């Protein structure tokens, strides 16, 4: 058992002023693994002051210097990527493959922004004016527990590239992963105060970060409910706000899809990361005439998935992150049954032989109707809802019938047709016959899935503001 009793402020690991203790359990066996001393209001105020002071000089660094800092951050994280992987498996329950991939991607993000930075023009001639892109100021970074290092890194890399300083408020439930990442950041050797990290409760630190006049921008990843609170608070000082929020992503299986590839892809799109992903393709829209075939194929594939210890290489689905998550998923499974959906596989309770830990049965419902809770709300676990449609127009309308619009998937053997369907979907990103992630492309959502974009040039410019000089 570890005691995590430090926050990172002004280039130093210090004992937090806060005294609340949070106990974190291993999701696979419920053993106590971490005791976390949480930071409080005084700690986050110190972090903001440190970032404000550092901004005075960091905002004036050269492109070459910031590019070097991005390289150093990459190198420091790669040096300890195995430690980050172990922390992600132990604290979060990610499978070995997922944990390694996500932390390597976090490191590579800094190299991507290094290249963007070196290619970016901070001064442009627009009409008769000179436009200078300047760093915003202190950026507050607030992240969720389901992609700790990746979510922090894509926001942090953009801020460093732009010349901004940061205060990071990660999920307190990812404290060990954050501690390892903080050690990497310290080893990278950036100037004191440029990067500050405070573990703490969101309802304690969040309101300060989103309302403090010395914070110029908020970059938040989390639920739509909390995102709305952040946005409301940020308006008091007119902060720049980037929100990456909830999703209820549809997967449109067109009638010409290659089922041998499309069905495994659909299962993976829903159950990847133990189902705990805002981009999960949790609504599978199937042509009525293909329903019987799709149901059988889904049952066969899901039935072969191995649920268990995330440290075993062959494990496909590990435990959910917390007891609260387990109970949340049980609620939705019961809701699906009670609302009359057809339970194809899975169901309530834990898989056989896994009585300890936050394990759930990968669950698939068919004959789901748009009014059902499982069709409308973000479940955030390995639960797939199959819905049927008659015409392509009906499928598009059904896909768009949601308050969310983060991601959508289309499966078809006709690329022209798939592209036409994709253009009609109300989603920030549409994947056609793939699960590929493009870190250079903008990421964010339509409707209540968010405001703004992160990643690539869009992420960089979210930390910049234009100044026009006319002479």
Image (cartoon, rainbow, N blue to C red):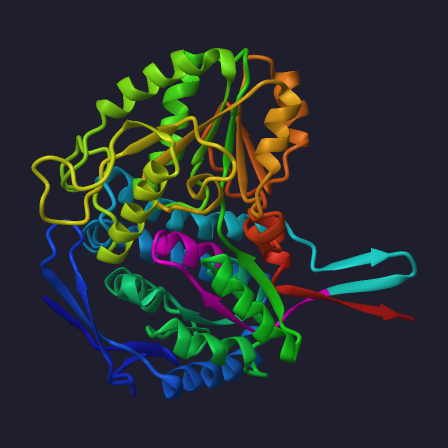
Residue 211, quarter of the rendered image:
bottom right
The percent position of residue 280, horizontal first and vertical second, equals 42, 39
Residue 246 appears in the figure: yes
Q: Nearer the viewer, residue 79 or 97?
A: 97
Q: Is residue 140 magenta?
A: yes
Is 363 left or right of 33, judged from the image as shown? Answer: right
Q: Is residue 22 magenta?
A: no
Q: Nearer the viewer, residue 5 or 181?
A: 5
Residue at image position (39%, 50%) is: 106
The percent position of residue 186, horizontal first and vertical second, equals 33, 69
The percent position of residue 54, horizontal first and vertical second, equals 50, 80
The percent position of residue 395, horizontal first and vertical second, equals 59, 26
Is 261 left or right of 182, judged from the image as shown? Answer: right
Residue 117 appears in the figure: no
Q: Above or below — where is 467 with respect to 437?
A: below
Is 246 left or right of 321, judged from the image as shown? Answer: right
Quadrant location of the N terminus in the rendered image: bottom left
Residue 47, quarter of the rendered image:
bottom left
Q: Nearer the viewer, residue 340 or 433?
A: 340
Quadrant location of the C terminus in the rendered image: bottom right
Residue at image position (45%, 58%) is: 222
Residue 319, quarter of the rendered image:
top left
Residue at image position (26%, 52%) is: 327
Magenta stretch: give its range. 133-155
Is 226 left or right of 56, judged from the image as shown? Answer: left
Residue at image position (40%, 16%) is: 294
Q: Nearer the viewer, residue 3 or 146?
A: 146
Q: Above or below — where is 364 with respect to 378?
A: above
């Amino acid at each position: 058992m570890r005691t995590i009793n430090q926050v990172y402020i002004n280039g130093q690991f210090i004992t937090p002023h806060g005294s609340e203790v949070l106990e974190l359990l291993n999701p696979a066996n419920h053993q106590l693994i971490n005791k976390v001393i949480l930071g409080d209001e005084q700690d986050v105020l110190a972090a903001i002051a440190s970032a404000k002071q550092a901004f005075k000089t960091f905002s004036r660094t050269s492109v070459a210097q910031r590019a070097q800092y991005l390289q150093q951050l990459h190198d420091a994280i790669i040096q300890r990527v195995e430690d980050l992987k172990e922390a992600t498996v132990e604290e979060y329950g990610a499978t070995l493959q997922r944990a390694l991939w996500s932390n390597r991607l976090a490191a590579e993000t800094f190299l991507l922004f290094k290249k963007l930075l070196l290619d970016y023009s901070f001064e442009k001639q627009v009409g008769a004016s000179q436009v200078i892109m300047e760093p915003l100021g202190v950026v507050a970074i607030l992240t969720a527990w389901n992609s700790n290092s990746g979510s922090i890194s894509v926001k942090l890399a953009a801020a460093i590239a732009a010349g901004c300083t940061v205060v990071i408020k990660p999920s307190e439930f990812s404290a060990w992963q954050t501690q390892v990442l903080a050690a990497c950041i310290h080893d990278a050797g950036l100037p004191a105060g440029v990067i500050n990290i405070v573990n703490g409760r969101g309802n304690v630190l969040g309101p300060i970060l989103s309302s403090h006049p010395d914070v110029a921008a908020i970059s938040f990843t989390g639920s739509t409910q909390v995102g709305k609170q952040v946005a409301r608070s940020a308006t008091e000082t007119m902060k720049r706000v980037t929100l990456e929020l909830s999703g209820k992503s549809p997967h449109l299986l067109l009638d010409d899809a290659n089922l041998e590839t499309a069905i495994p892809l659909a299962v993976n799109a829903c159950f990847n990361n133990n189902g705990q992903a805002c981009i999960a393709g949790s609504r599978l829209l199937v042509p009525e005439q293909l329903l019987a075939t799709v149901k059988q194929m889904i049952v066969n594939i899901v039935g072969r998935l191995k649920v268990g210890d995330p440290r075993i290489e062959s494990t496909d689905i590990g435990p959910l992150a917390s007891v609260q998550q387990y109970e949340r998923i049980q609620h939705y499974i019961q809701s699906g049954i009670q609302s009359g959906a057809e339970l194809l596989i899975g169901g309530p309770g834990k898989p056989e032989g896994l009585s300890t830990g936050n394990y759930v049965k990968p669950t698939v419902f068919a004959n789901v109707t748009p009014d059902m809770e499982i069709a409308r709300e973000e479940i955030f676990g390995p639960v797939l809802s199959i819905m049927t449609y008659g015409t392509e127009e009906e499928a598009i309308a059904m896909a768009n019938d949601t308050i969310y619009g983060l991601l959508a998937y289309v499966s078809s053997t006709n690329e022209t047709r798939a592209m036409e369907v994709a253009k009609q979907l109300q989603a920030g990103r549409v994947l056609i016959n793939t699960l590929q992630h493009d870190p250079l492309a903008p990421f964010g959502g339509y409707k209540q899935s968010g405001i703004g974009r992160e990643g690539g040039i869009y992420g960089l410019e979210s930390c910049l503001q234009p100044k026009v000089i006319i002479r």
